Image (cartoon, rainbow, N blue to C red):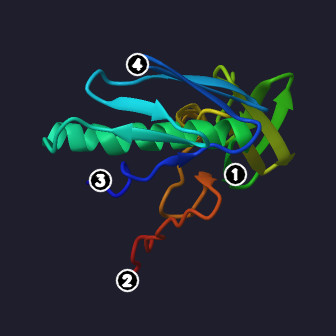
């Protein structure tokens, strides 16, 4: 059995999980998420937990088993606590600000870069060099953070750019002088 797949997903109080055929819906204090489950995987709901089962030990079924369980667990976490990715801007004059819901970045280009949030995602600018991406869907939050980082990825010579908080960027030595 899959170590991830065989573990039941605990459902905290205040969260409502509805399984209707192959559609799994999770509703909580922060919002609602749905998942269309693969036809071979069966999802059932017990009293305070959701159980995911597979029909056989075929490699595809084993992969889908763990994946489905992880997606449902992420949905439960998202509607209760939400997800957050933090990015920091490093570089002289690099700064971020919010204009309405749009994130405006000054990261060394001749023009400011404007990034509109994806659906279900919100930006928070804690300081001019620290940006948080918040939302209930883990995949959407990660995608939005990657789009922000892509505007100016960290470069290996000076370390300037947009990076995740805690991300290590290996510094290279510059051109050797003789």
Q: Which of marks 1 and 2 precedes in the sequence?
A: 1
Q: Residue at x 84, y 31 (%)?
A: 98
Residue 134's spot in the image, x, y percent? 72, 38
Q: Which of marks 2 and 3 precedes in the sequence?
A: 3
Q: Which of marks 3 and 4 precedes in the sequence?
A: 3
Residue 178's disc number: 2
Q: Residue at x 68, y 50 (%)?
A: 86
Residue 89's disc number: 1
Query: On screen, 127 above or below 39?
Result: below
Q: CA distance from mark 2 to mark 1?
A: 34 Å
Q: SS class of the residue under badge 2?
A: loop
Residue 122's spot in the image, x, y percent? 75, 31
Residue 68's disc number: none
Q: CA distance from mark 4 to mark 3?
A: 21 Å
Question: Which quadrant of the figure has residue 154?
Answer: bottom right
- Looking at the image, which is closer to me, 102 or 34? 34
Residue 22's disc number: 4
* Quadrant, the N terminus: bottom left
């Amino acid at each position: 059995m899959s170590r991830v797949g065989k573990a039941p997903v605990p459902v905290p109080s205040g969260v409502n999980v509805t399984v209707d055929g192959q559609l799994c819906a999770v509703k909580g204090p922060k919002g609602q998420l749905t998942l269309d489950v693969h036809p071979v995987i069966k999802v059932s709901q017990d009293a305070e937990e959701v159980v995911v089962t597979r029909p056989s030990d075929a490699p595809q079924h084993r992969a889908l088993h763990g994946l489905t369980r992880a997606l449902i667990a992420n949905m439960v976490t998202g509607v209760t606590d939400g997800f957050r990715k933090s990015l920091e801007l490093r570089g002289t004059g690099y700064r971020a600000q919010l204009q309405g819901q749009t994130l405006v970045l000054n990261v060394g280009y001749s023009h400011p870069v404007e990034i509109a949030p994806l659906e279900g995602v919100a930006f928070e600018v804690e300081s001019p060099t620290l940006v948080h991406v918040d939302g209930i869907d883990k995949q959407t939050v990660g995608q939005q953070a990657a789009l922000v980082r892509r505007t100016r990825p960290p470069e290996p010579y000076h370390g300037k750019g947009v990076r995740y908080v805690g991300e290590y960027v290996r510094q290279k030595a510059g051109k050797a002088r003789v």
